[in-house]
Image: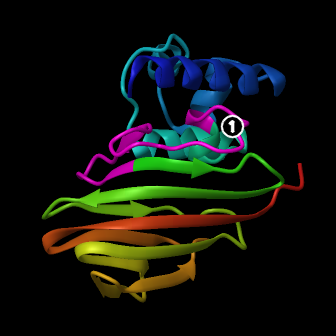
Amino acid sequence: MALPAARHLAETVRRHREARNQSLGELSRLTGLSKTSLARIEAGEGNPSLETLWRLGHALGLSIGQLIEHAGPAPARVQRAGEGTVVESARGMRGRLLQTDHSRHRTEVFELDLPPGSRFEGDPHDAGTRELVHCTDGAVVCGPADHLLDLKAGDTAHFDGGVPHIYAAGPGGGRALLVMSYPPDLR
């Protein structure tokens, strides 16, 4: 994670933890992450994995995009190829955030890079979360853990993100766009 993104993550985690009157120890208990790891994140150090970001977001009531991207993009902008915060899973999947919506109804768009052998097992999101995966290159296997869908370039899958789900590379790897649509934020 690039330095400005790490700084933004640090500020976001600290601000939301303090707003909830949580100690690092309490956040550690909620996330299963060590206090040392959390302190490093709040200091803007390290490069947290996708799994770590998911645990933090879940504990703080935020999406991954809300953790790593500033609110309020310009009314019109171009995001050049390769630009955007990249998050990586422990098992090789890389996601580049293309867009996150900070409104009551959150939507996020990621570009996924799934090299051969990569696999990400996602925990359930909030009930009502929908996911759309559009394979742009190669092959991707995705969907609910008990109902995996095989995609080739040009294919699109739609599924419930409120259940355990998987993103995995096809035999030669694959690339995809992931659109996550969260239920309205009632907080």
The answer to which image quadrant residue 55 occupies is top right
Task: Say which residue appears at 34% left-offset and 61% top-offset.
Answer: 120
Residue extending furthest toward the top: 43
The answer to which image quadrant residue 74 occupies is top right
Q: Quadrant of the N terminus?
A: top left
Task: Say which residue appears at 40% left-offset and 47% top-offset.
Answer: 96
Visible in this render: residue 131? yes
The answer to which image quadrant residue 61 occupies is top right
Camera-side residue of 137 and 144: 137
Disc 1: CA contacts within 10 A as few (<14), some (14-19) or many (>=20): few
The range drawn in magenta is 67-95
Camera-side residue of 37 and 173: 173
Where residue 151 appears, as percent x and y from the top left, is 31, 84
Residue under numbered circle 1: 74
| Left/right of residue 109 with respect to residue 171 in the rendered view | right
**Is the residue 114 above or below the residue 92 in the image?**
below
Camera-side residue of 17 and 78: 78
Residue 55 falls within the magenta-colored stretch? no
Residue type indicated by callout 1: Ala
| Left/right of residue 118 with respect to residue 121 in the rendered view | left
Visible in this render: residue 124? no
| Left/right of residue 35 with respect to residue 173 in the rendered view | right
* Colour treatment of the image: rainbow
State the predominant SS element of the stretch in magenta. loop
Task: Say which residue appears at 27% left-offset and 81% top-offset.
Answer: 153
Where residue 99 appears, as percent x and y from the top left, is 57, 50
Residue 82 falls within the magenta-colored stretch? yes
